[in-house]
Amino acid sequence: MASYWNIPIFAYTATSAEFSDSKIYKTLLRTSFQSLSSISDATAAFMIHHNLTKASIVANIGTDSFEKISSLEKALRSRGITITRRVMFEESSSAQDLVDNGIMNELKDNSRVIIPLFSSTRDLSSVFRNATQLAEMSNSDFVYINPLIVSRNSAEPPIFYGKLAQKTIKTDYPNTIQIYNSYGFSDDLLNEFIAIFDKTKRIYIDEQDLFNYVALYESYCVFAKMSQKYLHLNYKNTTAFAGNGSRIDGKSFYNMAIGMTFSGVMDNITFDNGAERMTSFSAFYVDGNRDQ
């Protein structure tokens, strides 16, 4: 509807890859810290950098998983990475089921790099981890790469942020590589954000939703600055704007955002050619024997 009425819209939590289609979402700007497209691209870039040119994908059957798989496969193929196997199983499967049904043997015989993508990340990650132990697929023989996709739905608990997340991540993903937002396991973003409101002392931050809080705040800031520039470029004064029905041209707003840079909580926000926030990702190796 926003495209039909030519109204600009800011998405601060949307992760779906379909929103990257500018032919459909012509007035959508995304300030969210990640999307399926961006984290899939980051995963593919990491693999190419380390000359990992073949990988298998393991996932549960379901709509959410299918969207993640489609986005990741597109990114991998665009960089010349071969997908040796795509293995899927029922969400109700146990670790023993994965072994008995031959799923783990199929991965063992055809893979050295394995990318798990689950719609219920933590529960199914635990099942898959137990299955790798039963199948004797140790981390010394296989590389497990987990794109940590921020998701908020009833089936999946939110991923934690900051140093408090480190213990949880070690429990859920020991001896794996995590592709995640560069601020994901640091308290820097939280501290900077709270400092903005420090004078009022009237803010409570649920760390589980930190990225969404920050993205919402930054959306307001970006909208205000873009509106100011839009009015300056198109109208001599606010009276002229009001005389035009006080309407902002959504497509013009979208085009104006491309390539623009704004000050964010931690660093600058830059919109790419799809009017999406350009996010910095890092690869974290989760060493269960270290405290960092």
Image (cartoon, rainbow, N blue to C red):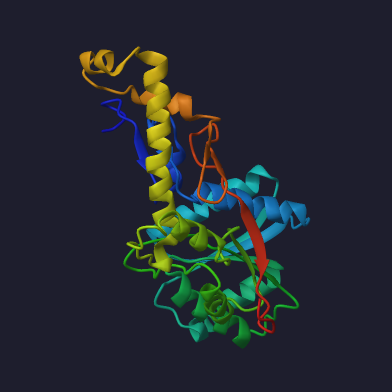
> Residue farthest to the right?
51
Q: x, y (%) of residue 189?
A: 53, 59
* The C terminus: image quadrant: bottom right
As displayed, is residue 171 above or below residue 281? below
Q: Quadrant of residue 105?
A: bottom right
**Viewer-closest of 286 and 109:** 286
As displayed, is residue 179 above or below residue 45? below
Residue sitting at x 51%, y 42%: 277
**Viewer-closest of 187 and 62:** 187
Q: x, y (%) of residue 194?
A: 44, 60
As displayed, is residue 173 above or below residue 16? below
Direction from residue 68 to residue 239 in the image, left or right: left
**Can residue 15 be spotted in the picture?**
no
**Can residue 154 be spotted in the picture?**
yes
Q: How many marks?
A: 0
Q: x, y (%) of residue 95?
A: 51, 83
Direction from residue 11 to residue 266 in the image, left or right: right
* The N terminus: image quadrant: top left
Q: x, y (%) of residue 215?
A: 43, 50
Q: Quadrant of residue 206?
A: bottom left
Direction from residue 243 to residue 279 in the image, left or right: right
Residue sitting at x 62%, y 85%: 133
**Viewer-closest of 217 and 208:** 217
Residue sitting at x 42%, y 16%: 233
Direction from residue 102 to residue 52 in the image, left or right: right
